[in-house]
Amino acid sequence: MKREMRKGRTVSDLKNAWPALPPAKRIRQFERLPRAEAQDFFLGLDARGHAQILLALPPAERRLWMRSLAPDDAADCVQEAPGEVREALMELLDEPTRKEVAALLAYAEDDAGGLMNPRFARVRPDLRVDEAISYLRREVADQVETIYYAYVLDAEQRLLGVVSFRELVTAPFDKTVRDVMRTDVVAVREETDQEEVGRLLAEHDLMAIPVVDPEGRMKGIVTVDDIVDVVREEATEDIQKIGGTQALEEPYLQVGLGRLIRKRGGWLSVLFLGEMLTASAMGYFEEEIARAVVLALFVPLIISSGGNSGSQATTLVIRAMGVEEVRLRDWWRVMSREVGAGLALGSLLGVIGLTRILLWQWAFHLYGEHYVLVGLTVAASLVGVVLWGTLAGSMLPFLLRTLGFDPANASAPFVATLVDVSGLVIYFSLASLILRGTLL
């Protein structure tokens, strides 16, 4: 009993530590697992984990582990492996599975065809319910990985309907499959993008969705666990882009330092060049700053508020686009909402800023005799900069989507840099108007 518990902890610990372990240690830990636990652990890994283990194992052991993968997982594993070893991995498969995997590799990896499993439960419409149940039991034991649903196909493999296993076992045995199947089947085409597949699974609360060709012949199914991996990868990539870096495409601790620097250095250099425009803007208003040094005290306050509001807006809009809550045609509605939000948020910060200036003047006498005008300048600037930041942050993803780019490229640092430069122009322009004849 103690030994079993110790083994259980080992498997659990390995699952938790796996992302942070170096490749060599991963293999050593994997090889120490008992056979049953090792198989469960192996099947639970992603394609990168499958490829790492297979390529590190002795050639004699690779065949067994490669053949334990479902065709869609085997295809993902082959795609993840270096080009020079892909053919060798394909040779490890039996002939029928090799043909299935080769067919899957012909699809783009982010399309439904590239995600689907060609092995699924299928029945004929004229079978009696008791015959269908017996047939499905044999089919599952032989080759079908999951049996969320049984798909009803005609002789040409065209999709006619779907029936859940629960509906079959509760139906009268003398009924035919045609009598109990549902014909309103939600299906996708082979070229359907993975994000659309995920949206349909979530919208219709399905565990699997069939994939059909243009003639309606069924090719496979995409299951919810496949989409969970896709959604996680997409979300990770978007978050990395929003943070102002290229997608890493590997776990953080597995990315080499040189590649990590290259992934981050490009965007950081672009942002740095953009921030140099801030210095140019400061130089343009050098005379105003020299005559009213007090204005320089509030530059960080102004530009950070605009950058923060823009980052908030762009993050919200990118997320709304990602989950299909917002589409391109909704740009006017979004802009209308953000105008109201920007004015309200800018006014809130303006009141806080003005109050702070008045209190500090009363306590420390820092801002001179025209402190009220200085406070009004800061307050008005906060309204303008926050409004502009909110509008820029919310509209930039729409612009990028219209131009065919990923909206996630409207990163928060990029929006903040944009608003920094324009925020200075707004601030000093308002200062020239409000303080003319006094400090300026």
Image: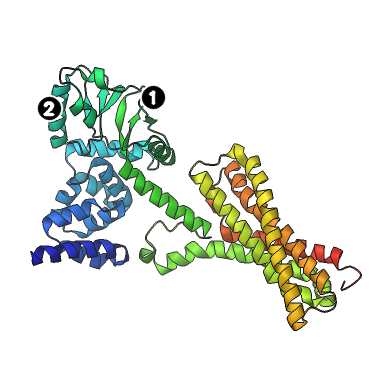
Q: Classify the position of the C terminus by image quarter.
A: bottom right
Q: Quadrant of residue 110?
A: top left
The residue lying furthest to the bottom in this view is 364
* Mark whose residue sits in front, 2 or 1: 2
Q: Residue at x 85, y 65 (%)?
A: 434
Q: Secondary structure at mark 2?
A: helix
402 sits left or right of 228 in the view = right
Q: Residue at x 75, y 64 (%)?
A: 379
379 sits left or right of 218 in the view = right
Q: Classify the position of the N terminus by image quarter.
A: bottom left
The amino acid sitting under disc 1 is Pro
395 sits left or right of 10 in the view = right
Q: Closer to the camera, 78 or 222?
A: 222
Residue 287 seen in the figure? yes
273 sits left or right of 239 in the view = right
The amino acid sitting under disc 2 is Ser
Residue 422 seen in the figure? no
Neighbourhood count class around disc 2 (C-alpha, 10 Å): few under 14, some 14–19, many 20 upward: few
Residue 129: % across, % down: 17, 22
Q: Quadrant of residue 153?
A: top left
Residue bearing mark 1:
214
In the rendering, which numbered label is found on residue 222?
none
Neighbourhood count class around disc 1 (C-alpha, 10 Å): few under 14, some 14–19, many 20 upward: few
Residue 311: % across, % down: 59, 58
Residue 47: % across, % down: 30, 51
Earlier-in-chain disc, 2 versus 1: 2
**104 relative to 253, above or below:** above
The residue lying furthest to the right in this view is 437
Q: For the residues marked 2 and 1, what is the alpha-carbon distance in whole angstroms? A: 32 Å
Callouts 2 and 1 close, C-beta under 8 Å? no
In the rendering, which numbered label is found on residue 134?
2
